Amino acid sequence: MSDIHLKTAIPGPKAKKLLAAKEQHVPRGPFNTVETFAAKGNGALLTDVDGNTFLDFAGAIGSLNTGHCPQRVVDALKKQIDLYLHPSFHVMMYEPYIKLAEKLNEMTPGSHHKKTFFLSTGAEAVENAIKIARKYTGRKGIISFERGFHGRTYMSMSLTSKVKPYKYEFGPFVPETYKWPYPYYYRNEHGDQKRLDDMLLAQFHDFFLNEASPEEIAAVIMEPVQGEGGFVIPSLYFVQQVKKICEKYGILFIADEVQTGFGRTGKMFAIEHFDVVPDLVTMSKSIAAGLPISAVTGRAEIMDAPGVGEIGGTYGGSPLGCVAALEVINMIEEDGLIARADHIGSLFAEKFSRLPLQYNKVGEIRALGAMCAIEFVKDSVSKEPDKELVQRITALAQSRGLIIMSAGLYGNIVRLLTPLVVSDEQLEEGFSIIEDVIKECCQTGG
């Protein structure tokens, strides 16, 4: 029996009433993928206020690797709520904060002594990783990558590459932030993968002559797989060479695992695919089943560079977030969710790998674990991005009860961030909807 039960058109009558209230009371800035309102979530399913049940393959933009309302997390939260809500770690400390820090120090790559502290959002984690890097090195420059996304606060927005909708008319931005190119093998016009990597790496060395001396650079921050940028996956060689450049010049390497962490790519952290040990790691999203908490973990001597009171935040590392995160980690480890991510990626590849041969408008299929994407173009020769086609595909999928999202600098990529607890039956149902919608849109023009 289908998991999807659409009782009314979207939006339904209750949702329309709430949309009118939203129009009146909420600014237009926050975007929404589906024009309805959640009433209940369970696993990979979301039910709206009008009784429509959807398969959720967006997973709160990657925040729900353990699914909606995992019972173990809910039970742990209920127990914690009866004890205390938020004494603030900066006023009176609490044990879950220490336990979670200990666990992340143990889990993140590298056997060196590490320390961890907590904040509330991914952007805050990035901001504080930059603060710590600057404090430790005594340098100011920060390098990020083209198409990278690191958040919407001013430092993180300065590191982010996409102008619209993230940066347009919000400047000026934080000075001494720079962009390096990041490989995009599907759009490579320079020969094989290794040749492109070497060409880009040569540009990095030229950068130190043309833009900023390496002695002025505090850190390089990299998403091991670009998220908003379109699920673009670099080579092991490229990532390792970037790390070697950092080591040569005493530049810290920050792995931004906000979207890629906690089992999403078939490793606990995506940087593990590249045999690179970062100096600092930023985390958020799926750390706590959707509760607002983020973390910075790094080498102890680096993390200790700021003095007392120089890093922190009133709500950072809330007890509820810490308790939820500890239970999420238990679920990932005990329920085999990392292996499950690989299984999801394999099923995705099996289902869709032939699409570029079937449809001229399907450019490339990409996946690392359960971080899966389909890139759409106007034709396979020009590879001109087709944002409008993706908009039609996502809208049609939603009308059939499947929530999917777009990504990419050009908005021409369908990305899947399926909860890792999704069943094979739900995957097959969702994949079949995607297959049917692509066929319909590519053959008829939508």
Image: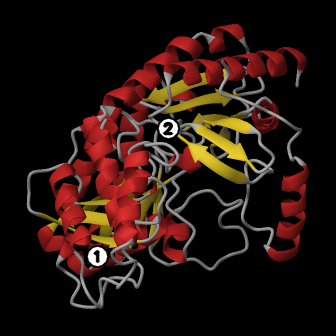
> Residue 302 location, x and y as percent?
18, 72
Q: Secondary structure at mark 1?
A: helix
Mark 2 vs mark 1: which is more N-terminal? 1
- Viewed as shown, does residue 261 lie left or right of 36? left
- Snapshot quadrant of residue 193: top left
Query: Residue 28, relative to residue 306: is it above or below?
Result: above
* Quarter residue 300 falls in: bottom left
Residue 158 location in percent, x, y?
53, 69
Tell me, yes or no, if residue 404 can be seen here: yes
48 vs 409, left or right, is right
Work out which quarter of the rendered image holds the C terminus and state it: top right
- 10 Å neighbourhood of mark 1: few (<14), some, or many (≥20)? many
Residue at image mark 2:
419
**Amino acid of disc 2:** Pro
Hey, what amino acid is under mark 1? Ile
| Residue corresponding to mark 1 | 132
Tell us which disc is closer to us: 2 or 1.
2
Residue at 41% from the left image edge and 67% from the top image edge: 126
